Image: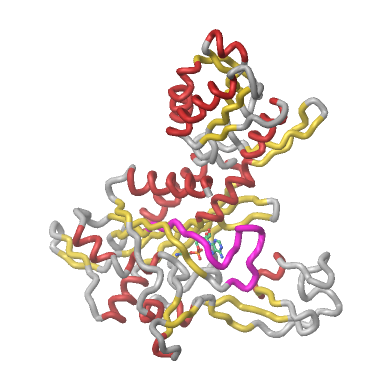
Amino acid sequence: MELKRNVKDRWWRSLVHARDDIEGLDAAILMHPKVWEASGHVAGFTDPMVDCRTCKGRFRADKLTDARCPQKPSKVPGEHTACDLTEPRLFNLMFKTFMGPVEDTAAVVYLRPETAQGIYVNYLNVLNSSRQKIPFGIAQVGKAFRNEITPGNFIFRTREFEQMEMQFFVRPGSDMEWFEQWRAIRMQWHHDLGLTPSKLRWHEHGPGELAHYAKAAYDIEYEFPFGWQEIEGIHNRGNFDLGRHQEHSGKKLEYFDPQANERFLPYIVETSAGADRVTLTVMADAYREEEVEGEVRVVLGFHPRIAPIKAAVLPLTKKDGLPEVADALYHDVKRRFPSFYDDGGAIGRRYRRQDEVGTPWCFTIDHDTLTDRTVTVRHRDSMQQERIGLDQVVAWVAAKLEE
Ligand code: GAP
């Protein structure tokens, strides 16, 4: 949870706080059902699904190679002699519920399958209540829901997940230039998160792959242990969305450019990342096993800025006044950074436990601390140790996080 929060905070800071041309928004999950008719999701947000008449398994027809036959897991569905797959059928991924006490078709509402539409229907509100001019963006982090046929790979594909989406509104004609800029910015963000660059690549959507709204689209893919998979999409949505909302609502969504004295419907460049998926990527990328003195050391080598626990405080023993000093230090550090206190077991074991959760630094209080007021800092990655002043620990961690 802390790790995902760090991912979301970094995303928000890089887009909303660090830039002047993006506003933040928190739109509704349940919106008027006509929003989803206008967006094309009622008609077109479908996955092809096949059933196996033999084992009753249900699979995505376009992702059969990612699935396993339940009766013969070494084969993909359809390859085993007993498999008897139906023809693909289209299946709408939106979850439905009912608004008000009457459960009839007039009361159907949808749980949003993407956060983007909440931005489009609020775009004029944001434009009119901020000092933004085109080009500008609106960013949002929030839950999305999809009735996935085959959720799996831990939190890679779930039915309820969080998206970090930003919609950038631009003048028609400048859209491809912005599209390229946003591609570069978003790839750099993943590098800055500490992900291994050689495990990141681009996948360009071919004509048959493009979503119903997209004019051009690239995915950022990561090489997971289960193969190359999408973690973020960058889409040139043209004027599809605003055009459809304008048409369905009857409300003009054009922008007036006072300098050029002209009106136009903005084009949209979208960056859309999954918060859970990026969190999984950070964990997969950070995980390593190394042999140290004949034993396997498991390390989550998170970048310190993303690590869920920044520091651990460990009294060497539970006596001689060491716990009191350690406890005071722990509370000092915890006021500034998420920290952990551990006084159980041999110090080597305690270091290993912190390695496994990715804590970059451990501060050990020993008998010398009582006389010279210094502590041992033990570094997760190098396992090296150094001594610093007890009263310098908080400033030391703060400085390290700035590096
Ligand atoms: N607004 C555009 C949009 O939603 P998408 O490619 O369908 O585009 C964007 O989704 C991102 O949302 C994906 O790259 C992925 O990170 C995340 N995502 C999509 N479906 C997901 C699911 N079922 N579970 C977890 N994350 C998901």
Q: Residue furthest top?
A: 371
Q: Which residues are magenta?
A: 148-166
Q: In the figure, residue 130 lies in which quadrant?
A: bottom left
Does residue 151 lie above or below 15 as drawn?
A: below
Does residue 268 lie above or below 387 as drawn?
A: below
Residue 44: % across, % down: 49, 79
Residue 199: % across, % down: 62, 45
The residue located at (14%, 57%) in the rendering is 259
In this rendered view, identify the residue nearer to me: 86 or 341: 341
The residue located at (48%, 22%) in the rendering is 393
In this rendered view, identify the residue nearer to me: 162 or 335: 335
The residue located at (25%, 81%) in the rendering is 250
Magenta stretch, main secondary structure, is loop
Does residue 95 lie above or below 181 as drawn?
A: below
In this picture the colour scheme is: secondary structure
The residue located at (41%, 51%) in the rendering is 182
In this rendered view, identify the residue nearer to me: 284 or 311: 311
Does residue 250 lie above or below 74 as drawn?
A: below
Residue 230: % across, % down: 57, 57
Left or right, residue 399 beside residue 318: left
Left or right, residue 390 beside residue 250: right
Q: How many marks?
A: 0
Q: In the figure, residue 68 lies in which quadrant?
A: bottom right
In this rendered view, identify the residue nearer to me: 81 or 395: 395
36 drawn magenta: no
Q: Residue furthest right?
A: 81
Residue 82: % across, % down: 85, 79
Left or right, residue 391 beside residue 346: left
